[in-house]
């Protein structure tokens, strides 16, 4: 089962995916017909440096200034509410740059308040999973919070729906792939995470509460592909679906979304 | 006007400060300020916070003043109201308060000019943006383990209407620990002013009503201990009290297991 935020509906609705499309409240639509918005979420927390390949790429630099030591606790950041974007909606290229990093990631939606949760119970706190394109202006340093690079309007595409946790039992071994204009540009697997999903939930809730509806982005893999204006970007996660967005120039004079 | 959100008699109320110093609830009742549970005066949207935004504090922390604002974000789990307590984990050796002017955004805006920035301000409050220095790591510093702990940011007691604050860039900032003055500063010493910050943030994102900007703290942050009463005060905005509490009340112990998990 999936939970879908259908355009025009206040709440998420339960749906059943099948070969013809999706059935919601007895009505079947093809995926082309279905108009969705981002699943309803509260605070969005991202985890940096959570792919083995990303840590390997940093390598010795982790022991040098300004980092001085490898990270101990999960390295988190927040994608604020202005970043939320939906399936098939445009992502705006800021006027100051020519490329954007497509941060394909699995999104974990928390199902109930989680404080100081042991790792072996952590998955009981998960409502489901979604696909996220955690967009960034490319930046090398992870020393200071990358708010100007990661918190721009529309820089967090989420969707097309939330797959309920029970429908994705192999979440620790799912393939994540990114295609740009139909060409496969990156492929990874959640087995490559430094901290597994249960470990993340345990180590994060040791110092802060995750609320029902909070969205946890488990990490951006190494060699995240970059997109330019005009590109069509598709992120596939096996067992969830495909999240599609396209890159457009920033509207002249800014955009009050 | 000074507005608050309080719990009283089994329900949450909007309240305002009455002329006799009591609170007037939204149902007309008058109650004493110690009869209510004070909640953060705003339900926050995005919480922006500033590091190193006072030259004297920046030098205290042995950093050069930043060339652009050092902005970080905080989650809603951090906010608690006036008269509350904040947990000091048992393994922490340095937990310091940070008295900060909190700016509450009143309407949505993008690319806001400095000259028009105050049109977007609904009001002001006092924040105490505690930091737990033992947990500092040099990745997205200040990292969330330092700055995003549950209840680590008392806010209140009041939301003071912007129209009642003649010059928010000239307000005395004072912190008292157990009645002893430990921090003194003035909002005029901010490196990036309120107008600078609103203009800077809105240059790359849309600010929205309910967003909060915690504008940074001046010189004079010192360690606090379990049982300490910390009062952070900003002239004309409010006097925010918080007590530092220990692990016991939360049923938390720093066991070797938790340590192993953290250090993995």
Image (tube, rainbow, N blue to C red):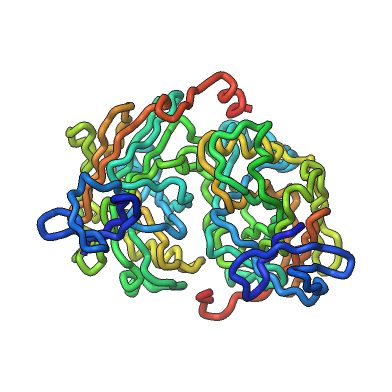
Up/down of A181 relative to A221, above or below: below
Tell me where residue A120 appears, x and y as whole percent: 68, 31
Q: Residue at x 77, y 60 (%)?
A: A235
Q: Which residue lies furthest to the left in this view?
A: B20
Q: Which sits in the foreground, B81 or A23?
A: A23
Quadrant in which the N terminus of chain B is drawn: bottom left
Q: In which image quadrant can residue B175 be found?
A: top left
Q: Which residue lies furthest to the bottom in this view?
A: A252
Examine the rendered structure and indicate whether residue B257 appears above or below residue A185.
above
Q: Is residue A214 left or right of residue B147?
A: right
Q: Residue at x 58, y 41 (%)?
A: A75
Residue shown at 56%/24% (left/top)?
Answer: B259
In the picture, measured across the screen, residue B244 lies left or right of residue B46, that is left
Residue B142 percent coordinates (x, y)? 47, 42
Work out whether residue A140 can be spotted: no
Q: Where is residue B218 in the image (x, y as percent from the top left)?
A: 29, 45
Question: In which quadrant is the C terminus of chain B drawn?
Answer: top right
Residue at horizontal 22 percent and vertical 52 percent from the top = B238
Depth order, front residue of A219/A171: A171
**Above or below for A215 versus B179:** below
Q: Which of A150 and B44 is in front in this view?
A: B44
Residue B180 is at least partly visible in this image:
yes
């Amino acid at each position: 089962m999936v939970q879908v935020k259908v355009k025009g509906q206040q709440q998420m609705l339960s749906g059943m995916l099948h070969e013809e499309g999706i059935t919601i409240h007895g009505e079947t639509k093809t995926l082309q017909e279905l108009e969705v918005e981002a699943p309803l979420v509260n605070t969005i927390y991202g985890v940096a440096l959570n792919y083995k390949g990303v840590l390997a790429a940093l390598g010795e630099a982790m022991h040098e200034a300004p980092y001085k030591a490898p990270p101990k606790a999960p390295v988190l950041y927040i994608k604020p509410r202005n970043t939320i974007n939906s399936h098939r909606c445009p992502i705006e290229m800021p006027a100051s740059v020519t490329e954007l990093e497509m941060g394909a990631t699995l999104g974990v939606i928390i199902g109930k308040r989680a404080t100081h949760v042991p790792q072996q119970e952590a998955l009981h706190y998960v409502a489901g999973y979604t696909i996220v394109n955690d967009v960034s202006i490319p930046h090398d340093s992870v020393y200071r919070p990358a708010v100007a690079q990661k918190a721009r309007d529309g820089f967090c595409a989420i969707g097309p729906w939330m797959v309920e946790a029970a429908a994705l039992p192999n979440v620790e071994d799912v393939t994540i792939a990114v295609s740009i204009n139909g060409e496969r540009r990156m492929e990874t697997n959640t087995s490559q995470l430094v901290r597994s999903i249960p470990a993340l939930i345990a180590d994060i809730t040791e110092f802060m509460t995750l609320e029902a509806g909070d969205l946890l982005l488990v990490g951006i893999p190494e060699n995240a592909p970059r997109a330019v204006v005009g590109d069509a970007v598709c992120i596939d996660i096996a067992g969830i679906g495909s999240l599609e967005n396209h890159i457009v120039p920033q509207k002249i004079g800014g955009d009050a979304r | 006007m000074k507005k608050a959100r309080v719990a009283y008699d089994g329900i949450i109320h909007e309240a305002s400060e009455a002329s006799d110093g009591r609170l007037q609830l939204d149902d007309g009742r008058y109650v004493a300020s110690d009869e209510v549970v004070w909640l953060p005066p705003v339900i926050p949207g995005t919480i922006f916070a500033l590091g190193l935004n006072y030259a004297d504090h920046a030098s205290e922390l042995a950093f050069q003043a930043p060339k652009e604002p050092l902005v970080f974000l905080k989650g809603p789990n951090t906010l608690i109201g006036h008269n509350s307590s904040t947990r000091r984990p048992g393994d922490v050796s340095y937990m310091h308060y940070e008295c900060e002017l909190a700016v509450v955004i009143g309407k949505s805006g993008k690319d806001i000019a400095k000259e028009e920035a105050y049109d977007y301000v609904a009001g002001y409050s006092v924040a105490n943006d505690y930091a737990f220095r033992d947990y500092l790591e040099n990745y997205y510093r200040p990292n969330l383990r330092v700055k995003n702990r549950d209840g680590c940011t008392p806010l209140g007691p009041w939301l003071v209407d912007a129209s009642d604050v003649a010059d928010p860039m000239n307000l005395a900032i004072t912190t008292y620990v157990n009645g002893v003055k430990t921090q003194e500063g003035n909002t005029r010493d901010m490196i990036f002013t309120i107008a600078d910050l609103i203009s800077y943030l809105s240059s790359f994102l849309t600010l929205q009503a309910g967003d909060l900007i915690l504008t940074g703290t001046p010189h004079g942050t010192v360690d606090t201990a379990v049982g300490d009463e910390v009062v952070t005060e900003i002239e004309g905005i409010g006097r925010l009290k918080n007590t530092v509490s220990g692990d016991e009340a939360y049923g938390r112990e720093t066991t070797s297991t938790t340590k192993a998990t953290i250090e993995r």
